[in-house]
Image (cartoon, rainbow, N blue to C red):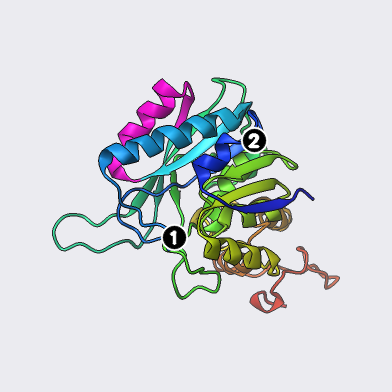
Amino acid sequence: MPGQVIINAEAVSWMRKQPSSMYDLVIADPPYNVGKNYGATVDSVDNRGYMKFLDEWTLEASRLLKPHGTLYAFMGFRFISSLYDILEKDRGLFFNSWICWHYTQGQGRRRGFSTRHDDIFMFTKHPKKYTFNLDDVKVPQKYYRGVNNMRGANPGDVWEFSHVHFCQKNRQAHPTQKPESLIERMVLASSHEGGNVLDPFSGSGTTLRVCQQVSRGCTGVEINPDYVKMTRERLRRPFRGFDGVDPRMKRVPLDLNDPAVRSEYTEDHKRWFLKNHESDMAGFEKEMLRQYGPFTRRKSGKSTAPKPRNADLFTK
């Protein structure tokens, strides 16, 4: 299995020392310059200093991408337009998607509208030749299609994933931890098994943890030694499924009235959409039961469907 490496270093300085064209995928979640305290650093510099930082890390990240590689970059609203111009005009990368990560809970405001999304750019090194594994990131459709595009639909550029709340078991001591399912979609879409991924602002180690479980190699660079230690401990923990899930992944398609088709689809659904989300399978099964009722049994006493993971949810 490809290895995971976490390095305690300042991102730009470390990247400058690396040979070019090393990585299939770069996932960058840099500081937004909004005053966050990251322990070893405080995310607050003047605008000129921050623009210099954007220029430096994007130069190195684009250089480290392979010719057919992809870059995903998170950014806050203050510098989102500047980042776009730098990536397209200065770095010569090709715009692919502007992803809106919608979350249901955000910072409350009494004057003005509360923030409920983050922006993520997807740029590629080549305009046409780049990895995009659509089947690996499709979402269930509203209606079952037995012949045409049965596996699912493109998830689109608006992604709904909940924040990793402080009450969750997987919550790390980091102020901007990203959901594993959010990063999972990027990794599955834009790299292959055995591929090489770079996260130059590793933080709580989410990208490393995702790559560990989906058979990609990953290098994370993090300036705070406490976060490096936290990441190493996180990588040693038993895997029990990624935190968070796109709510559509548990959606039960309509028109599954044929018991044999429904039985086959139920197992396909788990394999296609919930492979790394063991804890969410029960919710899907409950919704299947609510929508279609219990599986019927033949006169022989054998069910028309395979035994479910939670047998108590289905009538015997």
Magenta part of the protein: which range? 76-97
Q: Nearer the viewer, residue 274 or 49?
A: 49
What percent of the width, then of the height, locates residue 10? 51, 48
Extreme-left residue of the structure: 111
Q: Is residue 266 magenta?
A: no
Residue bearing the label numbered 2: 23
Q: Quadrant of the C terminus?
A: bottom right
What percent of the width, then of the height, locates residue 3? 74, 50
Q: Is residue 112 left or right of residue 219?
A: left
Quarter where residue 109 is shown = bottom left
Q: Is residue 249 above or below residue 195?
A: below
Give the amino acid at mark 1: Ala
Task: Decide: few, some or many residues near mark 1? Use Cα within 10 Å; few <14, some 14-19, many ≥20.
Answer: few
Q: CA distance from mark 1 to mark 2?
A: 27 Å
Q: Residue at x 63, y 54 (%)?
A: 6
Q: Residue at x 68, y 77 (%)?
A: 315
Q: Nearer the viewer, mark 1 or mark 2?
A: 1
Give the amino acid at mark 2: Tyr
What percent of the width, then of the height, locates residue 165? 44, 69
